[in-house]
Every structure is written in C-alpha cells, then in structure tokens.
Image (tube, coloured by chain):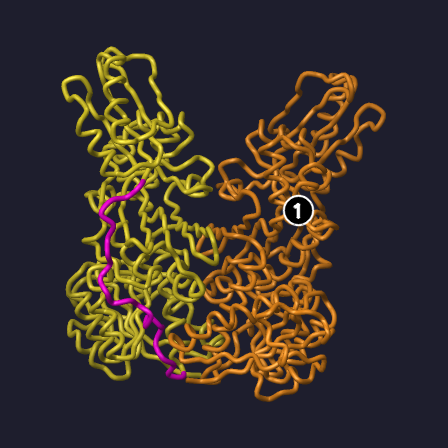
Chain colours: A orange, B yellow
Amino acid sequence: MKTVYIGLLGCGNIGSGVTKLLAEMRAEWRENYQVDPVVKAILVRDLSKQRPEYVDTSLLTDDKDRVLMDPEIRYVVECLGGEHPSADWMCEALRAGKHVVTANKMALALHWRELHDASESGRASLYFEAAVGGAMPIIKILHDSLQANRIDRLTAIINGTTNYLLTRMTEEGLDYQDVLKDAQALGLAEPDPTADVEGEDAMYKLSILSSLAFHRHLPVTDIEREGMTHITQDDIRNAEELGYRIKLLAHATNTAEGMDAYVSPMLVPAHHPLASVQGAFNAVFLHGHACGDMMIYGRGAGSAPTAGAMMSDLINAILQTADDRAPQASARENEAPAVMLKDRVSAFYIRLSAQDTTGVLAQVAASLSERQIGVKALLQPVERATEGAQITILTHPASEKNVRAAIAAFDKRAVRVMNVLRVEASDL
Amino acid sequence: MKTVYIGLLGCGNIGSGVTKLLAEMRAEWRENYQVDPVVKAILVRDLSKQRPEYVDTSLLTDDKDRVLMDPEIRYVVECLGGEHPSADWMCEALRAGKHVVTANKMALALHWRELHDASESGRASLYFEAAVGGAMPIIKILHDSLQANRIDRLTAIINGTTNYLLTRMTEEGLDYQDVLKDAQALGLAEPDPTADVEGEDAMYKLSILSSLAFHRHLPVTDIEREGMTHITQDDIRNAEELGYRIKLLAHATNTAEGMDAYVSPMLVPAHHPLASVQGAFNAVFLHGHACGDMMIYGRGAGSAPTAGAMMSDLINAILQTADDRAPQASARENEAPAVMLKDRVSAFYIRLSAQDTTGVLAQVAASLSERQIGVKALLQPVERATEGAQITILTHPASEKNVRAAIAAFDKRAVRVMNVLRVEASDL
C-alpha cells in the first residue's frame, strides 16, 4: 500500500465535490490499486466561510505554499477556475514536480505553452480530461489512442448549453429568448449566458482539442468566433426543409496549406451523426488518415461528470507515476506557430428578405454567378405581408471571401440579408 | 535508443501488412519514442510460398519456438486468426513473459480465461484493440478511461458487413439477396457470409466487450443469437413508417438481477445516435453510472484500420513495459460465473399476414391483452392479393416470455407470423 498526498486549490462546488468523491472511492482505490489517497491541504480564500459537512476543515489553509511547497504533496487538483491565479499556481506546482489535475479550460487555452514548459521543466504531468467534453474521454483518446493517426479535421459540439437551446428551438418551435429564460430557470444556462451563447467556451475547448490533435498549439486568437443568438425559427425551419439541422459547431482543419479554426452556427446534414446529438450532449467528430471518420459522443459538462473525469485523471496520474515514469508525452508538439489559411471553402446558407422577389432574385443570382458561386437549392415560401418575401439560398462549396464579397454587393435598398451560415459539408 | 525485438505469428494479409507498417513507422518511433523496433522472426506454415517483396524472407521460419522460445523477443504479434493453434500459442507466449498483440476475436472470446491466466502467470500483457471496432479505441476506453464507471448497458453495431447490407436495403429498397451479391462482388462480404449475417462475428465481439465492461467473463454460450437474413423490405418499410430503422445489434446488460446478452436485428428509434450509423461503420453505445450515455463511432474492421490498431497496441505495449511496469490491469475481473436473466423486458415488433384481417385482429389483440402486453402502434396497409393483408404490431415493453407465448397462441390457420423483432427502447 502506497500513501499518496494530494493538495487541493479551491474548495467551491468542484473542490468540495472532489473531496467527497475521494473519500467515497478510498476503499476501492486501496483494494484495486494498492493506493491510499490522502488529502493533505486545501487552499481557500476565506477560512471562515461555511463548508459542506464532508469537508475536513482542519485541512483548510489560506497559504498557497502549504499546497505548492510541501514536498510530500505530489498531486495537485486545481479547482479554482478562471485565468489567474490558477494558471500561475499550476505552473508553479508543475515546476515543483507535482502532477496537476484540472478542468480549467480557460487557463489551459490561454496559457498552453507556459503550462507545457512548466510541465517539462518539472518533469511533471498535467491532466485535463475534465476540461473538454465532460464524461467523454476525448483528451485521453487524442493523447493515447490516435498517435498512429495524422488528424486533419475536427468538428465538435462542445458546448452543452447552446446545443440544448438549439435542440429545444428545433423541437418545440420556440424562439431563442424564450428557451433561454427557461434554461436559466432550470439552471442549464448561466444568468449571464455570454460565454456560452457567444461561443467563448467552445473557443477555449477548440483551442485545447486542436492543439492536441494537430500537435501544434492553436491559440484562441487564431479562432474565428460567431455566437448563436441570431438564429431564428425561420432559419431552423428553412434548414429543416433543406435537410439540415442547425448546430453551434467548433471546427478546425490542419492541411499542408495551413490551419483553419472557427466556432459558428452551421447547417449539419440531417443524416450526419452530429445531427443526432441532442440536448446537453457533446460530440467530437474527427478524421484521421488511418482511422478515417470517428466520433465520440457523451454527456457534456456538469458537476458529476466533471468530478468523475478528474478522479479518473487523478488515479491515472498516480498509477503512471507510482514508479516515477516519465510524464505524459506531449513532446511531439511542433513549436512553429500555426500558419492560418487566408480563405476557406465552404457551402453557405443565405437568408434574404425582399419586397420585389423576382427582380431581387435576378440581381442576387447575378452577383453570385459573377463570383463562380453555384446555387444548390433555393427556397421561396409564400410571402408574408409584414416582412416581405423570404428567399433562402444554399450554395455549393465556394471561397468564403467570394461569398462575403457577393453578399456585400447585394443592393441594400432592395434586399435585406437576414442571416448567413456555413454548411458542414463532409462527404458522409 | 532501445532496440526491441518482435516476433510474428503468421504472414498472411494482416501479418505482411504489419511488417510493412513497422518498416514505415520505424524512423518515427526512433525519433518520438527512442525505440527501435526490429522484427526477428516470422512464423509461417509454408516456407516456399511467394511473399510480398517488402517481407524479409530471411526472417521466415516454420519452427514456432524461434518466436516463442527466443528470450530476446519480448513482443509477439499474432496474425494467424482462427481458434487453434492461435489461442494455444498466445498462451505459451504470455506464460513466457512475452507481451502479445492480437486482432483474433474468436480465440479471445473462446479462450478468455486461459489467456487471462497465462497473462497473469507470465506477468505479460495481452493487447487486442484491433479485435473489436477496427479503428475505434473502444478497448482502451473500457480499460483505461471508464474505470470510475459501473457500466450497466452496452448496445453496439459491431459488424460492418451486416450494417452495410441493412443500410443499402433501407436506402435503395433492395432485397437481402441482391445486396449480398453486390457486396460479395465488391469484397465487402465473404463468399460464405454465415459468420457475419448469422451474428457469430458480433457474438465474439460482444463477449469481449461485455467481459471488459462488466468485469466478469461473458462466455459466448451465454449469448442468444439471431441473424438478419429474414429481414425483408416489408420490415424495413414498416419500421420506417413507425419511426425506426432496423440494425443488427449486439446488446448486453448487467444489473443486480443478472446479466443478459444477445445479438439480434432490432428496431432503433430514428433519432437515436445508433440509427445514424451507416454503411460499414461501427458504434458502441454504453451507459455508465457516472458517465451516463456515451457512444463511440468509427470505421469497422478492414485491413488498414486493423493493422493501424495493432501498431498502436504494439507501441503502447513497448512504452508500458519499457521500464518493466506491471501488465495491463485486468485484476478486477470477478471470477464467479455470470448469472443470466431468465426473462427480459423488451418492446416487440410483430409482422403478421392474414386473410380475414378483422377477425384475426380481434383474436391477436385478445391473446396479447390476456398476457398484459400493451399495443403501442398498429399498421395495416392496403391489402395485397398475393399474400393477404399485413398487420404490424408494435408492443409496449413486456416480458419476452409472455410475448413469445402470446405469439405461439395465435391461430396458425388464420394468421402467419412473418417476423418478430425486438425494439431498442432506451429513453433517449
């Protein structure tokens, strides 16, 4: 039996959940792994704050060095969240040779290189399964199972809140604002939903996934980002009629020409496995040269899956290092900065509103064809008095620059551009 | 740089593919892992047989001990296939402390316990990612990532051939025999398709997956098995009208009352993620107490994904054992035999043919209701002169014993039972 000492940074929802789970799993770990996990110190900001009864208050401290400087503590579980001081303290722990477990996607995405360097200099590992995809072991799969693959493409639903909102908008015909209020009342969306609905959360996660998948750091500043608050029932119905569903996707490609990454609402073909991802579920769809198309699907974030994934990381960290093995390999990362594509090819969905539809259609068609943009489908439902006629165009794949230029050239007095969305066009 | 010596059992399609891939990856492994993989001996039956030009014929031998008895060879890749002598030689290698990589689902499923015991006695690991699900890392996920979960349910599409046949039958309205001929011409089905279409292949794979997921060996003799050759266009169209797709599923549950396992064609709700698994793709859908629902989806077997998965296993074996770590843990397996359920609860699809539909319907409804079997939906299309009227019934979940008894009690002179299929009824 080997006793391992663990330090916690933070004791909020996740931190106290971790102490509870650790106490519950202690007997099992002792029996199955001959490991006795002991929490030695828990860093908190406010010693006088009331804690759940299962937190041993004698372990609480407001001195970070009781966790970061204690040589007996070999494992640090970071449960503070946010960028600072989490990132700094994780670096400090790693440099001191302590293995770190975290779910902090923001600190990871924004300080990837520093954490990586700290991990190398301290010969300690950083585990972050819980940062992306809740209960899905996507980080481990990218790390361990797909080394024989060159992954060139990754498309993911990695924000449960927005997928929940879009699912209910699709299934119940409700508007964004109404579903949002409901989701907030149910605790499924934050009082301030910005980070989710504007795609920031998905952006951090995409940075982490891409950096692992492509073996090259993809900073968040290289990720184009568009939220989903402008999606209306008209878009959802049009998409349905054309054979698609609207999803907020995080998408990244890595080819010989360069990398490309964005978070945006997209039309997904109804028969595509990503289209069947409903509610708060997450999924990562990827393509590798050896494995071909692959998808992993599972429950997204949530306190139980998050704490569970952290426990799984912790026992992996303990078993990996029980005999002082080298840290989790990330040595293969290419340090040259990512070269980003200047343009991309995508099919587009364009929804327009106009009074004189015949004339407008001619003008719009001309503007598209001048720029070699083919029209794949056109929807023109019965006119509605209030907002003129709607015209919806689905293009063939084309240069995004050309599509944006064509749209910019539409005659603004005759036609209003209501929405422009990319179309997921993998050839499944 | 550490030189590792590898022995191959067999040099057919997979074996020669492995030697080719190893040669291709040698530079990368040397650079990334400081490991130099050297094939030292290749066991073949017939030394005089012509081999591909990339096979070094000086390594060929027909003496198994050149592989199994050479103390320098620490890694054995089994590429013989079939039950014997593969299983025996793998046991021998493991007992001699050699780590073994295999894709042989039949030998694994039929000799699970012996292989397990040999692995323990030789303190050597057995790697078999390639045996189930081709390129999907499902074995590794069950082994490494889901330890914190008690998995209670597993439903999988794990035979690419039958899923390809059913997909084409569904999409093109073709009959089984026609699609089969086509698939055979394309090399997607064997000249003798029995092992695939009768569910034997899926049965071996289900035995392996369940044994890992439930930490208790599920022998193939405990798996009920039904093939898919009796599925007709009528069934596929009826299922579609009721909102389902027909898939050949491998299904296993593990609850406090006992285990249950079967391979059979089933109706899957159209919105279920498994319904979107098309063509030769595979998917494993599972439920764990901590992770909830999870699915992994990917390309099924095929020589490239199989050899790729074996390479991935081999490098994992080498990195795991580079410093003589303990073998891959399977210590948690419960050795008590599985207690199988005597009955199961499932919804059923029942397709009948009758002349006098009104009278028959009354009799059938009475027989079902006597046994507390609720009818959820009923289809009765326009009569066709040739085979009388079709009646299709979808029941609510009920005791399978009761459903079978009710069907057995139908009046055989008035009604013909055309097909009876289970319905996948997870509450997604």
- Can residue A197 be seen here? The reply is yes
The residue sitting at 67% across, 77% down in the picture is A43
What residue span does the magenta drawing correspond to?
A: B323-345
Residue that mark 1 sits on: A344
For the N terminus of chain B, give its image quadrant: bottom left
The residue sitting at 20% across, 43% down in the picture is B194
B80 left or right of A133 in image: left
What percent of the width, then of the height, locates residue B396?
35, 33
Q: Quadrant of residue A152?
A: bottom right
Q: Quadrant of residue A65?
A: bottom right
What percent of the width, then of the height, locates residue B330?
33, 70
A416 left or right of B355 in image: right
A375 left or right of B286 in image: right
Chain for disc number 1: A
Q: Quadrant of residue B415?
A: top left
Q: Is residue A143 above or below residue B187?
A: below
10 Å crowding of disc 1: few (<14), some (14-19), many (20+): few
- Can residue B165 be seen here? The reply is no
Principal SS element in the magenta part?
A: loop
